[in-house]
Image (cartoon, rainbow, N blue to C red):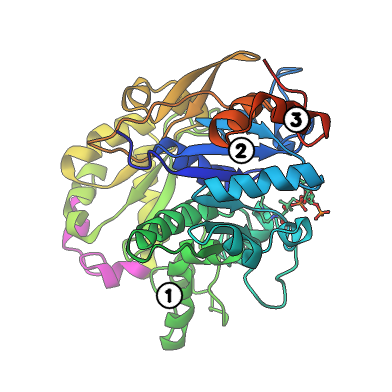
Amino acid sequence: MKALEGIKILDFTHVQSGPTCTQLLAWFGADVIKVERPGVGDATRKQLVDVPGADSLYFTMLNHNKRSMELNSKNETGKAVLTRMIEECDVLVENFAPGALDRMGFSWERIQEINPRMIMASIKGFGPGKYQDCKVYENVAQCAGGSASTTGFLDGPPLVTGAQIGDSGTGLHLCLGIVTALFQREKTGRGQKVSAAMQDAVLNLARVKMRDQQRLDAGPLKEYSQFGEGIPFSDATPRAGNDSGGGQPGRILKCKGWETDPNAYTYFIIQAAVWEKVCDVIGEPDWKTAEGYASPPERLDKLNQIFERIEEWTMTKTKFEVMDACNPLDIPVGPILSMKEIAEDDGLYATGTMVKVDHPERGEYLSVGCPIKFSDMEVAVERSPLLGEHTSEILSQVLGYSEDEIKEIAASGAVGELKA
Ligand code: COA
């Protein structure tokens, strides 16, 4: 038994933001029917191709556990099929450019007429306002959501992060919105429109930086390195390098091998509660009681010097030895793990966070599995569908068309070449 069993999703998503959302819904048990342009499909199928002729990893890693149907939603017969889909499905998810669904003839008003129980879920770059008509990709959202201006070092330009907070982050937000709307529909019997803007999702994830923006009114942000360095604050939350985002000072420090290994680093937090243990472990027991070091506020103007001394110690150890030494003492540290190290971590395969998936065109590949675990529901990761792999079965099983009707639909050019 899966939580969303019986829920049918008309998945009109493409690229990354929408597909991450519907992939989660599929993992939670919904029947996700990905509707793609005949002969073309989601553009990511053919982006960053590593195995010629096969769907790319970009596509396969974002579209597990879905079915694929080819349908031209601009063709008259295609529109009739889409109308049947809207009648049958519980949720329509889309992340087209603003206005694209209206231009197809399927406005929210029209969708409600066809199926008042339908939940329509949309991702757009921006919410209503001056930028509402813009097309938006990941890094635009990271910049417009406040993340980039607060990421990087004080003396360098704004930076985007590797984590796809604009796309996958918004997909997560929308997924939560959809299950919430399904829950509400249980009580009201009505569908509703659920929207998540990428700017809003990034800003939500950068919430602590808006906290700091307001704290600036009360004076300098003392936990930022720049305070200890005597550099004045401007009127906007600055970039904070690798300073920790909370009240406990932290930095990324070199470990043994850093000269040749770009990931021989550890994160190190000098949490107030374990300051004395930090002093012992690095060989500075006098700092436990020394004036200027004993309490957290006294240390704020010496953080660079303190972390340089800790780094002298971490450079004598590998990032894993630092962890082995600090964990038993409750000193929070974290190794900087490369994607290669994560891909080779057996423990992550044991929990299903990393999975190996077989694919008819590309063979076995690695993927990230469902990051959410349930005690009463197992999530099995299944390969992504080939383009139009399920068109026939959806037309017959889900929409109830007869064999002759399916032939007519195919002859109209509304669907691609039907697979056996
Ligand atoms: N049959 C017929 N036409 C189809 C179709 C189908 N099955 N699926 C899509 N189309 C059409 C659309 O109707 C649209 O036509 P129109 O412009 O004439 O109205 C066209 O294909 C292109 O869609 P669009 O969404 O504009 O794609 P794009 O490649 O130009 O833009 C994005 C891509 C991502 C920039 C844009 O979709 C967007 O801004 N989305 C919202 C924000 C977002 O999710 N961004 C992150 C993506 S990871």
User: Given the image, on which type of amino acid does mark 3 rest?
Assistant: Lys
Looking at the rendered image, the quarter that the N terminus falls into is top left
Label 1 lies in ligand 1 vicinity (Cβ under 8 Å):
no
Q: Which residue is mark 1?
A: 211
Dot 2: what SS? Answer: strand
Q: Earlier in the sequence, mark 1 or mark 2?
A: 2
Query: Which of marks 2 and 3 precedes in the sequence?
Result: 2
Q: Which residue occupies 75% across, 30% down?
A: 46
Quadrant for residue 39, please give it. top right
Q: Residue at x 31, y 30 (%)?
A: 378
Residue 360 shown left or right of residue 340 in the figure: right
Q: Amino acid at mark 2?
A: Lys
Span highlighted in magenta in the image: 285-300
Q: Nearer the viewer, residue 231 or 222?
A: 222
Distance from label 1 to label 3 (Cα)?
41 Å
Asked if marks 1 and 3 touch (Cβ < 8 Å), the reply is no
Question: Which residue corresponds to mark 3?
Answer: 46
| Residue indicated by mark 2 | 34
Above or below 296: residue 337 = above
